Image: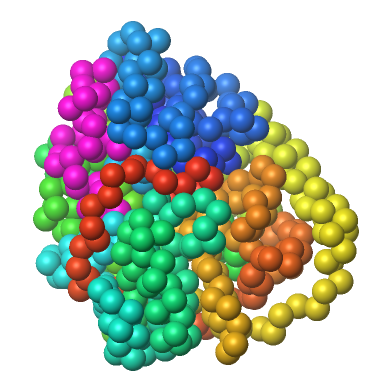
Amino acid sequence: MSLLDIRVPAVLLRIDRNPFHHGTLGAVRSLGRAGVEVHVVADSAGSPVRKSRFVRQLHPPPAPGASPAEIVAVLRRVAARIARPAVLIPMDDASAIAAGRLRAELAPAYLLPQQPGTLPERVADKAELAEVCAATGIPHPPTLVPDSPEEAAAAVRRLGLPVIAKWSRPWLLPAGSGLRSTVVLRSAREAVELYLRNEEAGSRLLLQEFLPPGPDRDWFFHGYADRTGQVRAGGPGRKQRAWPRGAGLTAVGLWTPNPQVQALAERLTGELGFRGVFDLDFRRCGSTGRYHLLDFNPRPGAQFRLFTDSTGLDVVRALHLDLTHRPLPDGVPLAGRAFVVENYAPLSALRPAPRGRELAWSAPDDRGPGLAMWALWSRHVAGRLLDRLHDGTAAQPPRPHTPVVRQAGEPLVPAAQAGEPLVPAARDEEPLVPAARDDEPHVPAARDDEPHVPAARDDEPHVPAARDDEPHVPAARDEELTGVAGASAAPGVSGLSGQPDRSDDEKASSC
């Protein structure tokens, strides 16, 4: 007999256009295996998720840039078809922000955690998160928010080079603008040029101090804060392998006990009064040993299934149990359990895993998505190679190697060389691999702004060379990026999703 109340369906909502989001598939399987009827409101055209036997019905998502009223209308149509209250589970930041704002309008058709409606937006906003960290004493690298071109140049001199530039609300970046969530700047001139695009970006520019990376410094914490505020399910994890190499989405993650990370997560969510599923990214400082919070994602992270305990409880099941007033079982954490995104680390998926492992796409009880993912991945890579041959660009010499930096959970971004134009960084939710986004693989046709990914290693998939207009992404070095603290809040914006073809993770994400 299922621990969950199978009379109550679940509706997974994802506004961003990322049909290859393996976190969505993880939620579908987690709830479907427990007997819950699962509906998916997301872009499903060509998505492996639609092949899952645990999906009851797929529904068209809100249009890109949809207004709050349009999002409510879509969800009310889905509710009318289901004809009974359902648990609503946002799967990206834009969806989480919309659900928080619209909680009153969506009740009683949907069950959602009770918390301030603006809180998801507050923690997802990178400028406001810096303020939150400063107010709560959570370590976060220094951040400055310039109010003029002159202040942008002065901030660079104060923080030192290289400096990290971020847009506070990356889900609002317009498609086709060339703007990216995070870039590394190597001069005050570049900071001024980027600042002048504030209005186009839809949110404020942040400049952050560089925090050096190192072995075992990238960590994440997934959890569920229940109705009382207690953090249940989930746990701390360590990024063992990322794609692109040395940064980007979590290709291999390991459940690793870490009392410091756990304490920071519980303290932060407790002081904020946060309720629901959350995903935090941390970077450990090599000189002080302190864990700096880099991102707060108010929704499930792509690799949340890593944290499945001895009772089968994960953060998505915890949410369903809590909102339907069912008790949460007290399971034993399965430290050492691994999570592998197999198309990014295929050999890791084949190696022995004595403490258990979950694959992002392949599952013996749900083979359709894994088979569909591999077919689409192969087709896409072949198409990219043909495009390169047709364009006649494959023989062009590579650019000089440049240092790279990143925010935990973000893809690698090359630093601009002297005299080169500013090279945009990949958005939070989009790893720099062909057709991959948000801390999750994405295999539809390549976009014009996809950057180049270096040749794969023996345990990573082959990726075709980049086009002329794509920035080169070299292998990771010892310079990478981090977040910061002490920023002023970004101004309010009316839209919930200004980007039709982007995602937010896992962090994208999401890590």
Query: At x 57% / y 21%, what residue is drawn?
Result: 53
Where does residue 61 sit, x and y in percent of width and height? 46, 29
| In this rendering, position of residue 146 left or right of residue 348 | left
Disc count in the image?
Answer: 0
Query: At x 62% / y 26%, what residue is drawn?
Result: 51
Where does residue 224 sit, x and y in percent of width and height? 27, 43
Query: At x 76% / y 78%, what residue is drawn?
Result: 398
Magenta segment: 98-124
| In this rendering, position of residue 215 left or right of residue 448 | left
The figure's colour scheme reads rainbow
Q: Quadrant of residue 144?
A: bottom left
Q: Is residue 99 magenta?
A: yes
Q: Quadrant of residue 451?
A: bottom right
Where does residue 127 sit, x and y in percent of width and height? 26, 64
| In this rendering, position of residue 234 left or right of residue 440 | left
Where does residue 181 sit, x and y in percent of width and height? 44, 62
Quick check: can you spot residue 509?
A: no
**Nearer the observer, 410 or 138:** 410
**Nearer the observer, 295 or 388:** 388
| In this rendering, position of residue 247 left or right of residue 209 | right
Q: From the viewer's perspective, is residue 349 above or below residue 201?
A: above
Q: Quadrant of residue 256?
A: bottom left
Q: From the viewer's perspective, is residue 236 above or below residue 134?
A: above
